[in-house]
Structures are given as structure tokens and as C-alpha cells.
Image (tube, rainbow, N blue to C red):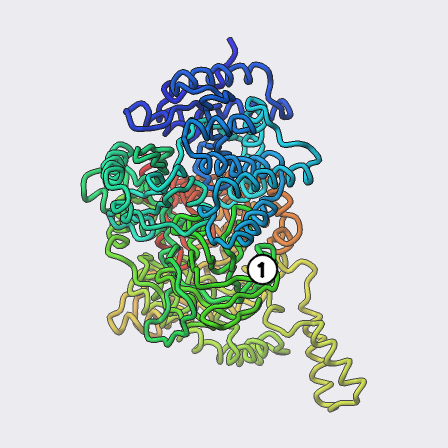
Amino acid sequence: MAAKNVYLFSEGKAEMRELLGGKGANLAEMTRIGLPVPPGFTVTTEACREYFSRGGGIWAELEEEVKAALGRLEEQTGKRFGCRDNPLLISVRSGSVFSMPGMMDTILNLGLNDETVQGLAKVSGNERFAYDCYRRFIQMFADVVLKVEHFNFEMALENKKKALGVRYDTELDASALKELVSEYKKIVARETRKQFPEEPVNQLMLSIQAVFDSWNNHRAVVYRQINNLPDHLGTAVNIQAMVFGNLGEDSGTGVAFTRNPSDGTNELYGEFLINAQGEDVVAGIRTPLPIARMADYMPEAYRQLTRLCRLLEEHYRDVQDIEFTVEKNRLYLLQTRAGKRTANAAVKIAVDMADLGLISREEALLRVNPAQLSQLLHRRIDPAARLDIIARGLPASPGAATGRVVFQADDAERLGGEGEKVILVRPETTPDDIHGIVAAQGILTSRGGMTSHAAVVARGMGKPCVSGCEELEIDLAARQFTAAGRRFKEGDLISIDGSGGQVIAGAVPLIDPVLSDEFTRLLTWADEKRRLGVRSNADTPEDARKAREFGAEGIGLCRTEHMFMSQDRLPVVQQMILAKTPEERRQALDKLLPMQQGDFTAIFEAMAGFPVTIRLLDPPLHEFLPKFEDLLVEVTLLKERKGDPQLLKEKEELLRSVRTHQEFNPMLGHRGCRLGLVTPEIYRMQAVAIFRAAAGLIRRGIPVRPEVMIPLVGHENELKPLRALVEEAAAGVMAETGVRIEYLVGTMIELPRACVAAGRIAAHADFFSFGTNDLTQTTFGFSRDDAEGKFLLSYLQQKILPNNPFEVLDREGVGELVTMAADRGRAARPEIKLGVCGEHGGEPSSIGFFHQAGLHYVSCSPYRVPVARLAAAQAALMHR
């Protein structure tokens, strides 16, 4: 028996999400519990996948199923599809398993043609309404199905309004709309060289095909890449009887959230428009009214909406994003889904719902996306700053940003890629602008509301957005806008405050955020559930203090080479590298030792007894020397210009030394433990500095837990002598100070051989810390900079790799090596401590893997510590 490809709303339920998509499953569920949902049916995600496997095209069996469901819809509504007397009109909408708002395509008012529009006018008694629906349908169908740029229709509409001296499309009468319909058809004929299709069933089949195809449109693909969503699922298609919000002043349409999606306040939040259809709200064509004003215009419908919003939130036990239409004072629900929300709102809502008993604390922890927590670190404008405010709009997405004005998404992407901070300024954004939104620091639009495309997408990305800023007059052709009588051109510097809706001339001082009580409580709950410890990578006392503020339980990686790079130390480091005799090198190291000791003292003090893992010098020494090419130019110029002979001699000597230190492949060259074995005096100096710093603090009553890490070990015979060197330094300091210091000595596991030989290496190590950045490079044979700059993007686009392995751990390769090393290390030394100090230590899915592998802690940058705390708790809850 052939698979069923079409389900009536009355045949589905919430649990059928994989088959019906999120929207279809929710429409079925609302129908099942008796809510006012216009009837309809869903073409399944399986049908979409079959469509692609067949190479496109609607096959006969699917067409027959759709026609049969259409017949049932005619019975339910008492209308006939394509009938002139009482026409059934339908909407065709996408609906993937995972919510992808605005990324795929929608068509409204399908079924209209030159005959049925007359029937609609007769049945409704409103000719203006009928032709308004018709012109909307032609534009949407032409855009989505026929691929005619919607700009053509917008220009025709604007020209018609200007010719008649009106501002809003609602001011156009039936005669003007009839003329627009005729103009729109001419546009279609001109752009496609074909007449607009009139036969309703043909319109429907073409629309289903177009929605299937929209699964692979550019913006949908980009959205899935950004949000790590799978590409193989396909989209369902939801076909639903139309209800009309554009029938007059007793009709309207809107979007409502059961709680405020920006800050999480427990209040009905949203917008609506009188005498409008749904796309008017989300597309930003008109600036809508706050949802609370609906009580003034449609009090009974508003009361019913409020009641149903609460019912839906309690039913789904989550915040709902609800689309609705009021047709002649009768309320219809068109969609409900889990509401997209800012990180701040997600945390507050999760904690509040747990406090109310709607969900458990464990569910609250699982409701917040760990990656979202970094959005809570939004900067805001310094309240003491004097602001040159030029306009005000709607506070659509919180945070503040400064950047140079750009008007096109492509320019935002290009300049952002070059490191320029930009603000994308548009009349309104569309899903096609997503690449520019990703690249921009913030978004500013002159139209649209709090639920417009710009607002929803910016909130999801954690970017500030000011929308509906009607004071702006944007001239895209001239690449400029005016506000408060002032002109701002592309490239001018502006700032926006997405929390207050302000647009400000010039740059503004920004300050770090203050974290909410709910944030602290949620992470406290997370700490109670997680097994993994969370440390931070920190090289300075400032980083260490920030890490402690965010809840780090120690430092998992302190990179000593960063301490050598400051301008006051670099000459001493270079003196040490270029020394001709052991005595000269010793003199330079004697100068560096107190500097290093001071560094370690400050970091130990900041961590106040928490463990601090210090990696001894890792990079090759040439990184501390001038660039060979720059020196060569200097020497050549001195020779040509007959410069100072003494200076020329010094530069030539330096050039020879730099040439000596050059390597063909520095990443695999004279660095890490190899450097310590060839020039042990460097590691000895660092070890003495560590233990003297520790002894000094212990004398003052400050606890210290140093952990000395030897980098790039691949063989036990590399670690054995360097461990002895560290132990000798520790013994010497303890003897000279009389202070006993508890410490560990371990190694960084970042080579495949180290993973294979982990059992033998563990005999000489108190801990392993997996350096997954370099382990990924050496496992794949990739140079990270070269890979990301030249071919890795192509690998991701061709699906050769599912993710960038430097961002998300490669479980099948690098992960297998981590597991092997952990297992062999524990077998040889059961008490060995196992951690991760690569950037994967702050990436949620990778943290899940490290939890399952039985590691003891992860370490990440200070600002990712909250992310890691929550991700570790979620891993513990999901893998009990």
C-alpha cells in the first residue's frame, strides 16, 4: 500500500511533528482540542523528500491525494474551489520540522482568477476587498512561483498611490485595485513571457512545488547552516481555507506572544493591524498597533484571544507565538509554535515557569539554548554618555552597537568580512537579507514592527535592532537617509540602542551588562546537576577575575607566551633568543624571571585557591623575532642609501639569526616540549617563577594550586625529563623558602601519537589536558588558517564535513582519539585528571561528548563559561 502523503488537520496531532512539520502538527493539535482553526490539510515532509528523489515535479498519486483532501475541505467550508458563485480560497504555507520563520515561502488567496474574483466580490458584498485579495495573490504567486521580483509590484503600487495622492494601500478604492490587477498581469507577462495562470488546481500544484523548492532556497540553506539544522528533512506544505482580515474595520490580523519575547515579562505581547492580511504584519509594509490596543477596536475578539493564549501556553507548557485573523469580529487561529525569544527572555521564562510549577527545574535547564547565553553579555550604552539622538523607533531586539551605515546586505557581508563594523539600514528587511544581517553589528529599519522579519531574526541572532523608525527617510538609490533634518550617507558612523529604540549620530561608549537574578538562579541549578567541572582559559589577572565572575572553577589553560609579547618584555625575550653564549641567555632569563613571577602571582591571587594550569612556552622562538621579510627590506634600504654602518651590521646579524630560526612548517617544528628539551633553561626559569609565586602567596595565607603543563608531548621519553626538571625546580624553591607547595605536572594531548601512547605517557603525568585545536589540525592534517581561508567553506557546502571541525568537535575522528587516550590513560593511572582546553570546551554539543567520554572538566574563554556550565548540566540530564 502506497504511503499516505496528505493528512487533514483533523487526522493529525502534536506528536506527528516529524511527518507533518511543526506548523502542521500544531494546526492538527489545535483542531483536535477544539480551537477556532480554519480547516485544512498537510502534505507531508515524506512527500517533499520523495519530490526531491524524483528530481522534482508533482506525481499523479500525490495530485490525486491533494484533490481528494481539497474535496473534503470543500465539504467542511461549504465552498467550491474554482467556483464563480462561492469560491473557496486557500493559503499555501511551508512548515518544516524545526521552526525556520520567514525562510521559506507562503502564498495567500490562492484560487482567484478573473472569474472567481467576481464571485468573491458578490459573496462578500465588497468589491474593493475582492480585488485587494486578487492583487495580493498575483504578487505573491508571481514572486514565489514564477520568480518575478516583488520590487516590480511594489513600484507599481507606489506609483498608483502617488498618482492618486494617497499614502496607504488601504486608501485605494476598487477601481484603483482593478487597474493594479491589470498592471500586475502585464508585469508577469513582460517578465515571464507567459500569461498569469488562471486555472486554480494548476495554481495549487505549482504552489506546492514552489514551497517544496523553497526548502533549498539560499536564505533557507543559510539559516540551517547558521542554526546547525539538518538539510535532509524537507518541508511539509500546509493548505488551509482562507479567512480574511482585510474585509473592513471589523477585521484584522496580528501576531501574539503569550509572554514578552524580548525580556520574558509575563504579559501578552504582539501587534495587530486593522483591515489587513497576515503578511502586512510580518513584512513590515505597515507599522502595526500594540496588541493591547486591540481591546479598543475588537473587545470581544481580544478577550477570546487572551483566554486562548493562556490555554495554549498551559497546553504546550511553553511560550507560544500565535498568528491570528479576525474576520468580521470572529477570531481564528492560524498558527501556534514555540516562540522565538532572546536569551534574556529564555532564562527569565524558564525560571518563572519553574517557579509556577508549569515545568520542573530540569525542564527549565533544557529549555535554554546554552549558546544563547552569550547574548546576555550584550553591551549597553553608558548611561552617563551624552547622546545625539536623531530618531526613535521600536526597541525590536536588545543591545547596542556602533557601525558605519550600509544599505545593502551584500555590502554588509563584504565589509563585515573585511573587519568593518556596519549597521544595516533598510526600509524593511526580507529573508533574502539574512547574509547581511549575519555580518552587521545591528539592524535599523524605517518600517515594520516588533514582530517584523528584522526584529525576529535579529533577536534570534542576539543582534540589536530598531524597527519601525518612521522618522527616517531612506533613499536607497542615493545611499543615504535623513533624520531630524540631517543627512547621513553610506559610511557615516551611527549607533543604535535596540533596548530603547534610539538612533544616535556617531559612536557611543558601551558598557558590559549586569546579569539578572534569573540568570544566576538558572546557573546555580545547572551547577547542581552537572558532573563536568568548568574552568577558563585566561592569560591575565583581568581574564582570571572575569572568569571567576562567570563561575569558572579554575584556569584550565594559562598561555605563558602571551606574557612575552608586551612591548616592555619583547626586547628581553629577543635578547634571550639571540644570545650567543649560555651566559648571555642566563642574563636575559634572569631579567624575565621576576616578570613571570609577577604574572603568576597576580593570576594565582585572582583565582584564590582554585587550580591554575600553566602551559610552559609552546610556540617556536621565531614568533618573538621581527619578520624576515621586513628585516630584509630594512637591510636592502640601508645598503642602497648607504646608511649607518653600525646599524647595518646589527640588522644583518639579526637577519642571519632570524633566517636560522625560520622553519618550513613551524606548527610541526621546534616548539613545545621540543623547545624545552633543547633549551631546558627556558622551562626551568618558568618553573622557578611559578613556584616562587606560589610560595609567596602561601606565606601570606593565600591558597594556591599550580598545575604545570608540558605542551606537545608525543612520546613518554619527552615528558619524563621535563617532569624531572619541573620537580627539581619545585624542590629547590621549597628548600629556599621553607614553604610546602602541592602541585601537579601533566601534559597537553594534541598529537595522534600521544593518544595512541596515552597509557605509557600517563605513567609520568598527573593530568591530561586535550588541546583539541591542535589535535584537530594534526588529526586532519589541516593547517587551521589555510583550511578556513581556502577550502573548508567548500567542504561544508559540499557536505564533505557536517561542521567546521575547529568549531564543533569531530566525534568520529578526533573524538575517537580523545576517548582512546582517556581510556588508556585511566587504565594506566586510575587517578589521572582529564580535561579539555581547546575552544571545543565552550561549544555545547562538544561538551556533551566530553561528558559522555568521562572527562573531569572543560576549559574555555571567560565569556563562554556560562555556556559551558549550562551545556554540562544539559549533558548530565540527557545522558543519565
Look at 32% across and 50% down and name the residue there: 290
Question: 845 or 559: nearer the eye?
Answer: 845
Look at 22% across and 38% down and name the residue there: 358
Q: Quadrant of residue 255?
A: top left
Counting labels gives: 1
Whole-percent x and y of residue 300? 23, 38
Question: Relative to 107, does residue 628 appear above or below in the rendering?
Answer: below
State whether residue 482 appears in this view.
yes
State whether residue 453 appears in this view.
no
* Helix, strand or loop under label 1: loop
Question: 285 or 876: nearer the eye?
Answer: 285
Question: 185 or 318: nearer the eye?
Answer: 185
Tell me the amino acid under the disc marked 1. Leu
Name the residue at the right extreme: 640
Whole-percent x and y of residue 821? 48, 43
Question: Relative to 114, does residue 588 appear above or below in the rendering?
Answer: below
Name the residue at the front extreme: 175
Q: Report crowding for label 1: few under 14, some 14 to 19, many 20 or more residues within 10 A (C-alpha).
A: some
Whole-percent x and y of residue 348? 27, 50
| Residue underneath mark 1 | 476
